[in-house]
């Protein structure tokens, strides 16, 4: 009898396990930053966190990460140990920014067959992360809806306790007329209240200042509920502007090695030049942000740090808002090779933007294969200012060819960051 009981118990536990097991194993890995823009690279893991937070409460979904994916790919037999009927999906995501717009593409891959199960696209505003979060998680839920069964109510093994139901009596003409009459009187009374309130004869005002006018609730805030300028924030604002001016004008540190000159094996009259430069943020910038300013929020993801400054501590001027929104702080590195007479012989403009490549000259070399990546970015909305900084080093090797006589005449090298709006006039002044 004990043996029979153990067998029955084992079968019961096995069936319970199979029934309670998840229907979908979802592998969510870091989203790919298509444009490799450093200032928004934090969104790659941020999207993963959004999805995990939303799907964690779903009983039929078991979340998996990058390590779990590598294990299952290296040892496919692990799929056999999962509850019967389970599905394994990999969620691949890519994103890119176009001004303030974020485009996200999602792809759901069935790991068992490595075939695409679904594909979606969505867009959102970079300054409205909450709305973008809602769009993303809702889209993922729709993609998984087909594979998550709706839970059914279990049948009760005990007979239901039945209670005799009293048959509904038909309403008599008198009862129905009384109900209609009462509804009409109630509606007329409410209409009178609304009309009396409009002419000032009657009103309904709650303790919190909310006034109901008909079907509308009104809360009078006065002339200005949130003043655009508060004198109490002047001290914080002055400290912030000092740091921001330094960040926008001169945030970078540059290391330059002596250029290497190599004779071209295919052309004896030409010499190839290799010039190595390393870009990084100044060491004191992040320290100043951490120690001197009362920031509202701080988020760190590896080498990326995002500071948030809210309007309840600072006064954001219209000039600052326009400067950030129109990107007037952005600058481009220009390298100038000078001869013995201090005249420019070669100009290197490190920007792939075709709009900047309008000025034509034999002395100008536009860099399109090695792109300088800004290590600092600013975003401002109606309520907060965000400053994103990345504490990494960017090594770049500039390669170009010159006639031997021109290469021999180089005596000095100058590197200067020029604002985008001033770049054209600056280059023309050197030619």
Image (cartoon, rainbow, N blue to C red):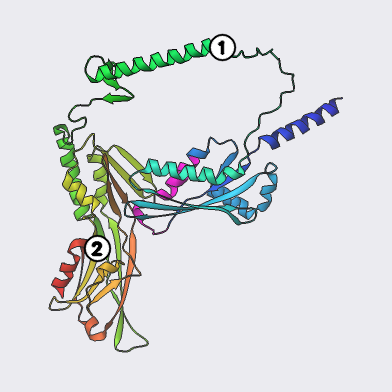
Q: Residue 183: x percent and y percent?
A: 43, 16
Horizontal side, residue 140 vs residue 112: left or right: left
Residue corresponding to mark 2: 332
Is residue 38 found inside the magenta-colored segment of the image?
yes
Q: Residue 163: x percent and y percent?
A: 69, 13
Q: Magenta stretch: dominant SS?
A: helix
How many C-alpha atoms fall within 10 Å of the one at disc 1: few (<14), some, or many (≥20)?
A: few
Identified at 56% across, 12% down, the residue is 172
The image quarter in which residue 95 lies: bottom left
Q: Residue 299: x percent and y percent?
A: 35, 42
Label 2: state its secondary structure.
Answer: strand
Horizontal side, residue 127 vs residue 338: left or right: right
**In the rendered image of this protein, does residue 59 appear above or below residue 282?**
above
Which quarter of the figure is the C terminus placed in? bottom left
Q: Report the span colored magenta.
A: 34-52
Residue corresponding to mark 1: 172
């Amino acid at each position: 009898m004990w043996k029979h009981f153990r067998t029955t118990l084992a079968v019961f536990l096995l069936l319970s396990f199979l029934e309670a097991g998840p229907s979908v194993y979802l592998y969510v890995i870091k989203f790919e930053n298509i444009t490799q823009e450093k200032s928004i690279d934090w969104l790659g893991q941020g999207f993963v966190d959004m999805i995990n937070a939303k799907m964690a409460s779903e009983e039929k979904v078991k979340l998996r990460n990058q390590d779990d994916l590598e294990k299952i790919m290296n040892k496919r037999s692990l799929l056999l140990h999962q509850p019967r009927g389970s599905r394994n999906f990999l969620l691949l995501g890519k994103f890119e920014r176009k001004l303030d717009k974020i485009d996200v593409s999602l792809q759901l891959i069935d790991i068992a067959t490595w075939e695409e199960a679904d594909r979606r696209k969505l867009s959102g505003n970079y300054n409205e992360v909450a709305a973008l979060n809602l769009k993303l998680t809702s889209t993922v839920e729709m993609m998984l809806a087909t594979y998550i069964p709706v839970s059914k109510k279990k049948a009760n093994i005990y007979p239901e306790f039945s209670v005799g139901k009293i048959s509904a009596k038909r309403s008599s003409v008198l009862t129905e007329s009384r109900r209609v009459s009462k509804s009409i009187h109630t509606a007329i009374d409410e209409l009178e209240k609304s009309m009396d309130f409009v002419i000032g004869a009657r009103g309904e005002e709650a303790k919190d200042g909310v006034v109901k006018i008909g079907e509308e609730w009104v809360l009078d805030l006065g002339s200005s509920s949130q003043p655009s300028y508060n004198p109490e924030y002047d001290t914080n604002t002055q400290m912030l502007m000092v740091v921001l001016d330094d960040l926008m004008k001169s945030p970078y540190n540059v290391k330059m090695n002596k250029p290497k000159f190599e004779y071209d094996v295919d052309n004896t009259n030409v010499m190839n030049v290799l010039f190595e430069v390393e870009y990084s943020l100044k060491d004191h910038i992040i320290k100043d942000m951490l120690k001197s300013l009362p920031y509202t929020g701080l988020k760190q993801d590896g080498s990326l740090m995002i500071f948030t400054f809210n309007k309840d501590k600072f006064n954001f001027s219209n000039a600052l808002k326009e400067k950030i929104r129109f990107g007037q702080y952005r600058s481009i590195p220009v390298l100038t090779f000078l001869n013995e007479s201090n005249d420019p012989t070669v100009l290197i403009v490190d920007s792939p933007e075709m709009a900047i490549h309008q000025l034509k000259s034999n002395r100008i070399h536009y860099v399109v294969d090695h792109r300088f990546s800004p290590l600092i970015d600013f975003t401002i909305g109606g309520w907060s200012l965000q400053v994103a900084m990345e504490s990494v080093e960017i090594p770049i090797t500039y390669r170009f060819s010159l006639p031997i006589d021109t290469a021999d005449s180089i005596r000095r090298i100058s590197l200067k960051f020029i604002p985008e709006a001033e770049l054209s006039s600056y280059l023309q002044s050197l030619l």
